[in-house]
Every structure is written in structure tokens, then in C-alpha cells.
Amino acid sequence: MFATFSGSSRRPRNVDLSGQRNLNPWTSSNRGPIQSGASKTVAQAQAERERRHREREELAATKRLQRVWRGHRDRRRLRCLWRQEYDLLYQQPMPAQDRRRRIKQAFPLLLASLVPRRPDDQQRLDLFVADILSLPSTSPSTIDFSILGQFEWDRLARLSVAALDKYAGLCI
């Protein structure tokens, strides 16, 4: 009869580890090349890894964008607060002997908040320079230049030149 007959009529169990539920193994639902269960599983795992990687990158980009925006917003708010404090110093007229104190208080606020493109900041710079020029010039040390370091004075000079450039551009 049959040379391969072992005495048992029971078929061996076929275990499919691909995770697909194809009840009829002789029919194929897709018309493309047939992938084996292992290669399909590897392809799915690779696609899943790529999806998770994209999600991590999107999350990191979102965090970076939020950090940049919050920093920008906080710097803008601080400048606004410093401008308000500076404006409070210059609201009322002061006698000449108190102007030195006001210059010392206003100088760091001016450096921190001055944006040469803004007309209101140019007016603040004008007030500061007017204060310096209104000091009596009886001695060469009328202004205490040691209130801040060289870096701060250099920054004020650069900001003043930028404001003058902006002002000169408006006059031409």
C-alpha cells in the first residue's frame, strides 16, 4: 500500500507563529509576493520601531519648541518689567544731587531692557544721556564710571551707536 504509512492516520499538528489567521493555507489574500511568517514579523517590528522613533523625535522637537518660546516670552516680560521700573525712576524731576543716584539705579535697567529699534527705548536712552549731561562738570570725576565694569560700558556704547544709526536712518 503506502510505503510511508506509520500506522497512525492522524496528521501532525501545524503551528503557525506568524500571528496571521489564514484558515485556508492554499489561498492567498494578497496578490503580491508571499512573505513567510518570520520575515513579516521582522518587518512589523521594524515598522513599529520606526514609528516609536518618530514619536520620540516629535516629542523632543515639541519640548525644544516650547522651551524656546517660553524663554522668549519670559525675556520679553522681564524687559517690560525693567522698562516699567526705569520709567518709575524718571517720572518725577530730581535735583542735581540725586541724579547720580538715579544714574546708578537706571544704568543696569537700561542695559537690560534697551532695544535700539524701539522708539520708546530711544527716549529712555535720551533721558539717561540728559541725566549724565546735566551733572555739574566742576571736576573730571563727575560721573562714577566704576559703577559697572568695562563690559557694561562697552555694551552701552554699542547700543547707543545702534540707536543713533536707527535715528540717522529716520532723518535721511
Image (tube, grey):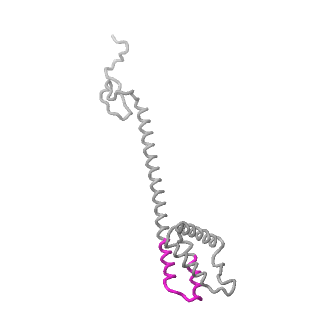
Work out whether 14 lies above or below 158: above
On the image, which quarter does residue 2 sit in?
top left
Q: Residue furthest top?
A: 1
Give x and y (percent) for residue 121: 51, 72
Q: Looking at this view, is 159 or 68 the one in front?
A: 159
Q: How many marks?
A: 0
Work out whether 142 lies above or below 8: below
Q: Is residue 80 magenta?
A: yes
Give x and y (percent) for residue 8: 33, 20
Give x and y (percent) for residue 62: 44, 55
Q: Residue furthest right?
A: 140
**59 sits left or right of 12 in the view:** right
Q: Looking at this view, is 2 or 149 the one in front?
A: 149
Query: Magenta part mainly helix, strand or loop?
Result: helix
Residue drawn at (32%, 29%) of the image: 29
**Looking at the rendering, in which quadrant would you find the N terminus?**
top left
Work out whether 34 lies above or below 50: above
Q: Residue furthest front?
A: 172
Give x and y (percent) for residue 116: 54, 69
Magenta part of the chain = 78-107
**Looking at the rendering, in which quadrant would you find the C terminus?**
bottom right
Q: Looking at this view, is 119 or 11 the one in front?
A: 119
Q: Is residue 149 magenta?
A: no
Work out whether 169 lies above or below 56: below
Residue drawn at (41%, 38%) of the image: 44
Residue drawn at (60%, 72%) of the image: 156
**149 sits left or right of 166 in the view:** right
